């Protein structure tokens, strides 16, 4: 089978796999399945279960909140989302990329809260799988902030609520607005979550070469420097001075 023919085969098979048509209709186009129509149709069920598993694994706390609400049913959520955003590409986890924004657009009263839970859980995936920074990158680029750090202002303490779920506890309201850094650690590469103070925002802005807004510009330089040190110790920022010192100690290669 040529590459073009193979692409055509999957193009005809795809609607059935996503539940848009029956196995019998697919056989009219592709011919009868050697294993029988019923067995061919099972692939629709298999794909549907896999899509459900992706969303359950990537958004466990979000799913728990939706299931607790009882309406809409989780199965209906998965089906509606898959219809609006069918999977593409080779990475199954990417199926969940649009889930936070899709949830936010739903008319249910809990959608705003669910969307923030989903956003946080998706950022954890993005940060964990952030591309590595090249070893020969300059010290500013070395931070890789555009790849591995995400800043969010949530209307409630989303990380705390998700942690309650992870511990098997009832998920509380956590209604205190919370500023959050979700990041991959600059040294250990572990996933991290950090709640910065105002000076931490200033330190981050300075590291990114951004001008400070009036409120942050009023901070004392010593306060910003102290916050920068805290961010470096937490692994949010790359330790530029320590790296420079190590580089000075290492002899040049011949």
Image (spheres, rainbow, N blue to C red):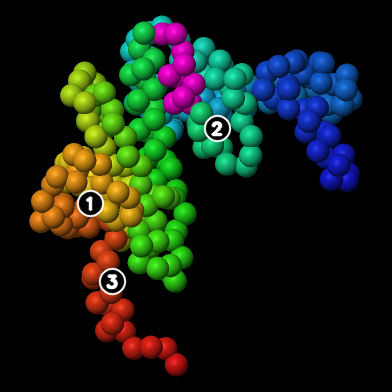
Picture quadrant of residue 83: top right
- Between discs 3 and 1, the one toward the N terminus: 1
Give the residue at mark 2.
95
Depth-wise, is mark 3 or mark 2 nearer the camera?
A: 3
Give the residue at mark 3.
243
Q: Residue placed farthest to the front in the image?
A: 214
Instruction: Give how far apart the Cα atoms at labels 3 and 1 are.
Output: 18 Å
Task: Tell me the element at label 1.
Answer: helix
Q: Residue 25 — which label?
A: none
**Principal secondary structure, stretch drawn in magenta:** helix
Depth-wise, is mark 3 or mark 1 nearer the camera?
A: 1
Give the residue at mark 1.
203
Instruction: Give how far apart the Cα atoms at labels 1 and 2 are.
Output: 35 Å
Horizontal and vertical percent position of residue 227? 16, 52
Q: How many marks?
A: 3
Vertical side of 145 occupied by 44: above or below: above
Vertical side of 227 occupied by 109: above or below: above
Q: Quadrant of the N terminus?
A: top right
Residue 164 showing in the rendered view: no
Q: Residue at x 74, y 15 (%)?
A: 21
Horizontal and vertical percent position of residue 185? 31, 54
Vertical side of 219 occupied by 222: above or below: below
Q: Residue at x 22, y 30 (%)?
A: 178
């Amino acid at each position: 089978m040529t590459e073009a023919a193979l692409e055509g085969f999957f193009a005809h098979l795809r609607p059935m796999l996503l539940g848009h048509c029956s196995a019998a209709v697919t056989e009219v186009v592709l011919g009868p399945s050697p294993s029988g129509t019923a067995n061919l149709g099972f692939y629709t069920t298999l794909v549907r279960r896999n899509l459900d598993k992706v969303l359950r694994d990537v958004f466990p706390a979000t799913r728990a909140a939706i299931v607790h609400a009882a309406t809409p049913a989780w199965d209906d959520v998965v089906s509606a989302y898959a219809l609006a955003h069918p999977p593409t590409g080779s990475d199954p986890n990417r199926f969940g990329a649009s889930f936070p924004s899709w949830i936010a657009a739903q008319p249910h009263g809990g959608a705003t809260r669910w969307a923030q839970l989903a956003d946080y859980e998706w950022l954890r995936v993005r940060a964990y799988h952030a591309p590595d920074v090249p070893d020969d990158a300059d010290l500013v680029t070395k931070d890789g902030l555009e790849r591995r750090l995400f800043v969010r202002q949530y209307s409630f303490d989303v990380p705390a609520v998700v942690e309650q779920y992870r511990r098997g506890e009832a998920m509380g309201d956590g209604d205190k607005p919370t500023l959050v850094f979700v990041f991959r650690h600059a040294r250990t590469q572990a996933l991290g979550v950090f709640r910065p103070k105002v000076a931490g925002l200033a330190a981050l802005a300075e590291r990114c070469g951004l001008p400070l807004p009036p409120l942050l510009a009023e901070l004392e330089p010593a306060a910003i420097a102290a916050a920068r040190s805290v961010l470096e110790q937490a692994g949010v920022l790359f330790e530029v001075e320590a790296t420079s010192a190590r580089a000075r100690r290492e002899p040049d290669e011949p």
